[in-house]
Amino acid sequence: MRGKLLPPGRLILTGCLFLSISFPTYPQAPRGITVSGKVSLPDSNPATHLQVIISGTNGFSAGTNTDDVGNFRFEGIPRSIYNLTVTIPKSMPFRAEPVSVDTTREGSNFAANIFLGNPMGDSTEKEKKAQVISTKEAKQNIPKDARKALDKAKKYREQKKLDAAMAELDKAVRIFPEYFQAFMEKGTVQVQSGHTQEALQDFSKAIQIFPEHEPALSGAGYCLLSLGKYQQSVDLLERAARLDSSHTQNLLFLGIANLALSRWQKAQEALEQVLKLDSAGAVSAHMYLAEAFAGQHLYSRAADELNTYLHLNPGAPNADRLQKKEKYWRAQIAKNN
């Protein structure tokens, strides 16, 4: 993803499940299970005081509000498959797709973070440019009806008619089972629908057909990151980065995945590359890079990165907390000296 809207064939990640690098620690609920997470704005800042609704196939539903740092929590709820939705005030120019959480799986604590997206119409001319056609794509003999179905699906997705888009995509792959672009698009629709596991299956199918398809590698890597499978995520995101070293969102997720694995230097390298490619648009990378430096006990560089982030984003809802963290790191510098 580059910027607010991706060119054709790119995975749209905004408005979908997004993995934070850390979660608050809570005591386990006495009964049932716990679903907790964070709602984030498109620039990765926390979305505070928004209503989050959880509703399950078992008929259970409940609501809560995000706190001062964007966190929400439901505890003691029965096992089921749930949808999480965020109520967006008319005054906020964002959108939010529902996120699916399957709590019937083993475990008692489930993370389901939500990343708000910018309006679908926001784009730049650079972002509208199509990808370079690969040799494999050029040699494809795709039936006309399959191409037509994929084109229809893309239009339906842009109109947020996701069920109609999926129906056209199912048609496309029935006609042409090797249509990896259609599987890629299916994965994108699944992500927008909040179906991360299903999206991973579709991206994986695209990769199986065309192992060097960078958008599918990036999409699968994102899904694995969201599912907490950090090493597998890194493996695919690194493959994607070798194929396209200018895909800043892919590099950002690669940095976050390495942070989750405490691979501070690897995270640093990816995040520094993000800022080299898009210093103006990738403001949140400064915040993550600060964590990478702190992990290496480079507190001066960590504090400076956090200071840069706060300078570029003075209205950040989490500014107070980050200022305290910067102060703590600067205290560590004085202590070590």
Image: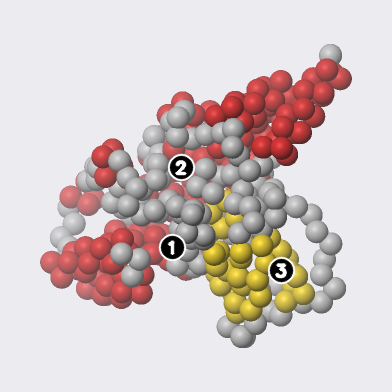
Residue 206: assigned label: none
> Vertical placement of 94 versus 243: above or below?
below
Structural crowding at the residue carrying mark 1, measured as other residues with C-alpha within 10 Å and reported as few (<14), some (14–19) or many (≥20): many
The CA distance from mark 2 to mark 1 is 16 Å
Looking at this rendering, what residue extends furthest in the left direction? 144
Q: Nearer the viewer, mark 3 or mark 1?
A: 3
Q: Amino acid at mark 1?
A: Gln
Q: Amino acid at mark 2?
A: Gln
The CA distance from mark 2 to mark 3 is 30 Å
**In x, y percent, where is residue 242?**
42, 37
> Vertical placement of 271 versus 203: above or below?
above
Residue 290's quadrant in the figure? top right
- In this rendering, would 314 be left or right of 110? left
Q: Which residue is mark 3?
A: 74
Residue 57's quadrant in the figure? bottom right
Q: Amino acid at mark 3?
A: Phe
